[in-house]
Amino acid sequence: MRKILVITFSLLLSGAVMAQGTIVGSAHDFSSETWNTTGQICIVCHTPHNAKAGYEPLWNHEVTTQTFTLYSSSTLNATDLGQPEGASKLCLSCHDGTVGLEAFSGTTTNTNLITGDALLGTDLTNDHPISFTYDTTLATNDGELVDPSSSTEVAGMLYNGKMECSSCHDVHNTPGIAKLLVKSNAASALCLTCHKK
């Protein structure tokens, strides 16, 4: 009986936590947009069948082919900073403003482009660098980064050992934090996860 009560309490607690953040009603809930004639939420990005080859998870949206102007700084010690890849390229497939929001499930029109604060464009020089390897070597060479081999939190934010858009942003709004952040940035908490300042 006690085990059942503990499991029930755990499920209720996890349900309450999950209810705090959800894609429903978030900036990525496109179910009521006129260009999304399906009325579905997930299909704009994902499909259970005929996903784009080479992209995960079950990617359904057209992928940007743009060449980006990258962040550059004399203090940046990343040695493999190149064009966005992986999850970041998928994010930029809407946020670069060159691929239509409605370009999913085979639709290739570019009628409805992202605008406003969500539009990053193809000039990423004023944005946090992405798609670079963040490892012990980088942390050591930089001297002001947390070593991911000594921090499970930092290691858990990386994708295939790389810093990506999704290292700091949760597209599904799971935590329910403004700007789709993976954790609150009050007092720079998110920044200080990786940066020792």
Image (tube, helix red, strand yellow):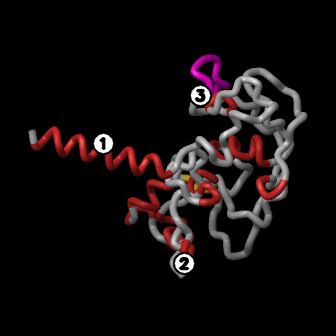
Vertical position of residue 52 compared to residue 131: above or below? above
Q: Nearer the viewer, mark 2 or mark 3?
A: 2
Instruction: Depth check: give the residue in front, 165 or 39.
Output: 39
Label 2: which secondary element: helix
Marks 1 and 2, the one that precedes in the sequence: 1
Marks 2 and 3, the one that precedes in the sequence: 3
Give the residue type that dot 1 points to.
Leu
Residue that label 1 marks: 11
- Residue sitting at x 63%, y 64%: 78
Instruction: Depth check: give the residue in front, 98 or 82.
Output: 98
Q: Which residues are magenta?
A: 46-54
Query: Are dots 1 and 2 in contact, CB under 8 Å?
Result: no
**Disc marking residue 187:** 2
Label 1: which secondary element: helix
- Residue sitting at x 74%, y 46%: 92
Residue that label 3 marks: 58
Give the residue type that dot 3 points to.
Leu
Instruction: Depth check: give the residue in front, 97 or 30.
Output: 30
Quadrant assignment for the N terminus: top left
Is residue 95 visible in the rendered image? The answer is: yes
Q: Position of residue 86 (x, y in %)?
A: 63, 42
